[in-house]
Image (tube, grey):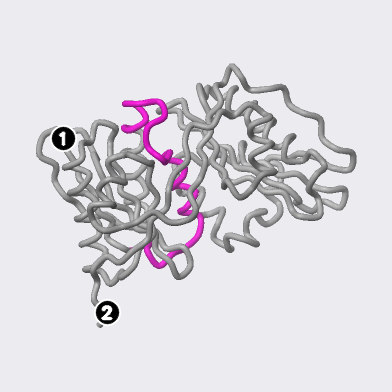
Amino acid sequence: MGAAVERHLSGIDAVVATTELLQRNRAMHPTAGMYEAADFQWWWRSPRRTDEYPQLFWFDDDGPVAAAIATAWGEATALDPLLLPDADDDWAESVVGRGLEHAAAHGIGHVELEAVPDGPVERALLRNGFTPGDGGYVEGWIDAAAVPAVSPIADGYSLHRRTDRTDRPHHYIRRSGADVEARLLQTSLYSPDRDLLVEDDEGDAVASGLFWFDPVTQTGLVEPMRTEDDHQRKGLARHLLTSGLALLAHAGAERVKICWSPDNPPAASLYLDVGFVPDRRTRMFAGPTGCVPG
């Protein structure tokens, strides 16, 4: 790789550049890296204190080649170093180190990071004094050819797309805030046609799932999936998931990704039974950036 130029972008411009970087990553390898472009577009759904943070990117003549993205999650801040699959340890060390330095310079004193075991980012974190902690996620994939038939829905429930329910507030408002639909519509990959919800016989949304398709990479992502507590164990999540997978396959997805916590056995059981194949489990790190509080 030739010399890369550092640039700072914020707001939706940073989301656009992150999308380009992760699409470039996926074009180079079908499963490398922890994230899809749709992950960061989903994170854009709610205002965050990092919206105007000057996100750190590196560009070559063809576009972004690396980034260190800070994302506020409540009081915590995650820092995600993003690299292309051909990145070596020296380049990872530079991106991680510069990302920590940049975060510290902007008053972020502590960060949480997720990394692929034995990858260049993890090795850079270990060299910077970070140690792995609890947590991490399992990443699973399913090929479009393996997508199962849509399972039946339980009596008293019905499946809908967001396009069927534009006369009412978005079903994600309760957890993601009043701006959720407007912000999702600012992104390039969100589709109301693949924003699914299950309603009970009173018209209340009791389960939902968002199925993202990236036409640049022919990759699908399921994020998020949720069934309300009082409506679990009725097959709603299976119907929702198989319906969404069918939509993604019809749209042209060659493979679909989903992630789950190892501490959520019911989700793992469903995803494995539907046909997702675990690929790896990430590890979590946390530590100081070097920022000295004022």
Looking at this view, name the residue that lies furthest to the bottom.
Answer: 294
Q: Nearer the viewer, residue 127 or 177?
A: 127
The residue positioned 58% from the left and 23% from the top of the image is 249
User: In the picture provided, is 179 more to the left or to the right than 54?
Assistant: right
Image location (x, y in percent) of residue 278: 53, 32
> Above or below — where is 234 with respect to 130?
above
Residue 149, quarter of the rendered image: top right
Q: Nearer the viewer, residue 109 or 20?
A: 109
The residue positioned 31% from the left and 57% from the top of the image is 130
Magenta run includes residue 108: no
Range shown magenta:
24-52
Residue linked to disc 1: 61
Q: Residues within 10 Å of mark 1 (few under 14, many from 20)?
A: few
Residue 76, quarter of the rendered image: bottom left
Secondary structure found at label 2: loop
> Above or below — where is 86 with respect to 15?
above
| Labelled disc at residue 293 | 2
Image location (x, y in percent) of residue 87: 23, 36
